[in-house]
Amino acid sequence: MPERTCLGCRSVLPKSSLVRLAMDGEGRLRPDPSGRLGGRGAYICPDRDCLNAALKKNAFHRALRSAPYVPAADALWYEIKGGAGETG
Ligand SMILES: [Zn+2]
């Protein structure tokens, strides 16, 4: 079982219990649960506190080794919870 580190709380957990985020073709950070976007992924627990912590630390930029456009925490959280689907 592959494991990944949550960018928020630094817990090492099975990949399947974390939320994958990646950069889309337009350079925007978005949830990528299916791994469809490819490239580097960033992982967090499905927990708002972990999202906030990761945003605060600019952890996504570091994890992706890129400078994605990062939506506001509220918008991103809504997408993580499945509100926006994958086509956005
Ligand atoms: Zn976490």
Image (cartoon, rainbow, N blue to C red):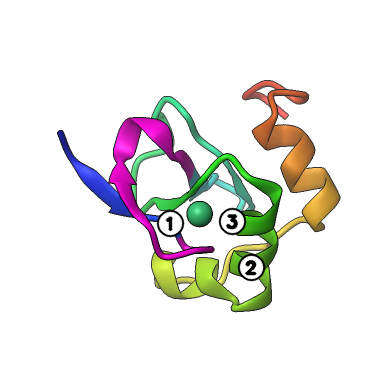
Query: Which amino acid, by three-letter code, is at mark 2?
Result: Ala
Taking depth in this image into account, of 12 and 41 the one nearest to the observer is 12
Q: Are marks 2 and 3 in contact (CB under 8 Å)?
A: no
Query: Which amino acid, by three-letter code, is at mark 1?
Result: Cys
In the image, taking residue 23 as reference, residue 40 lies left or right, namely left
Whole-angstrom CA distance, mark 2 to mark 1, is: 10 Å
Q: If you read the primary sequence from the N terminus, does the residue marked by circle 2 or circle 1 appear first?
A: 1
Residue 23 got which mark?
Answer: none
In the image, taking residue 80 as reference, residue 11 lies left or right, namely left
Per the image, the residue denoted by label 1 is 6
Query: Which amino acid, by three-letter code, is at mark 3?
Result: Gly
Q: Position of residue 28 (x, y in %)?
A: 64, 53
Residue 27 got which mark?
Answer: 3
Whole-angstrom CA distance, mark 2 to mark 3, is: 21 Å
Please tell me whether residue 20 is drawn above or below residue 1 in the rendered image. Answer: below
Asked if residue 23 is among those painted magenta in the image, a careful observer would answer no
Taking depth in this image into account, of 84 and 2 the one nearest to the observer is 2
Q: Which residues are magenta?
A: 7-20
Per the image, the residue denoted by label 2 is 53
Whole-angstrom CA distance, mark 3 to mark 1, is: 21 Å
Nearer to us of marks 3 and 1 is 1
Q: Residue at x 29, y 51 (%)?
A: 4
Q: Position of residue 62 (x, y in %)?
A: 45, 75
Q: If you read the primary sequence from the N terminus, does the residue marked by circle 2 or circle 3 appear first?
A: 3
Q: Residue at x 52, y 66 (%)?
A: 60
From the Cβ of disc 2, is ligand 1 less than 8 Å away? Answer: yes
Q: If you read the primary sequence from the N terminus, does the residue marked by circle 3 or circle 1 appear first?
A: 1
Asked if residue 18 is among those painted magenta in the image, a careful observer would answer yes
